[in-house]
Amino acid sequence: MKRKILLVLSAAYVIFMAYLCFYYFSKDETHSYQVAFGGIFCGLIPLGLILFTKIKFNMPIMISYFAFLFASQYLGSILDFYRFGWWDTFLHLLSGALLAFVAIALYERMTHQKARKEISYWLVFLFVLSFSVFGGVVWEIYEFSMDQFFGMTLQGGGNFDTMVDLLADTAGAIVIAAIAAFRTKIRFKMS
């Protein structure tokens, strides 16, 4: 059932972005159709994973992924919500938290349940935080690379923009990492 819901959600996002791509291409709005074209690929990633792998997906993370894509690509770039100074920072705060949830899901899949009782809550905190912050760093490398190689302006404020983005990513990650560590500590005491 989850796979069917995610299949529909992914296909709907791809179709929506394909429509926008053709619409803005016909209006010769280069920026908007390029963003929509990128959105098609972002929507195809989960679709490909659903169709060609046996990965079990975490429904809240996947719904958050599509909500984030919609907020950043459609609202942020196409409808120009990025003109509001706080929008980019807000999305980085959310992406830090979202990546932290992905880290928790990975941690739970990569460790045996019995072994988790022996793992320090500090290690959980550091893993979740590091994974999330690393994701933010990779994104900033992407923005820098696009600006340098393709003349884009993803880092509108240069170094200041990058540092604010990384601080927001880290803040979102710290909140979720602290909650994960606290929950791990509680479980450790209970066992």
Image (tube, helix red, strand yellow):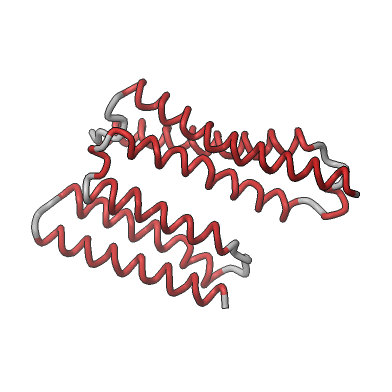
Q: Where 152 falls versus 115 (above or below)?
A: above
Give the quarter of the image for residue 121.
Answer: top right
Classify 62 as above or below 77.
Answer: below
Q: Residue lying farthest right? A: 191
Image location (x, y in percent) of residue 82:
27, 40
Instruction: Point out the residue furthest to the left here.
Output: 27
Name the image quarter holding residue 157. top left
Residue at x 34% of width, y 66% of height = 14
Query: In the shown orientation, is residue 125 left or right of residue 7?
Result: right
13 and 168: which one is in front? 168
From this view, report whether residue 22 is shown above or below residue 73.
Answer: below
Is 29 placed left or right of 48 in the picture? left
- Position of 61 with respect to 184 (left or right) is left
State whether residue 7 is above or below residue 119.
Answer: below
Task: Name the residue located 49 percent from the left edge and 70 percent from the top edge.
Answer: 6
On the image, the x and y values in percent for residue 152 come to 24, 36
The image shows residue 96 at horizontal and vertical percentages of 51, 40
- Quadrant of the frame with the N terminus: bottom right
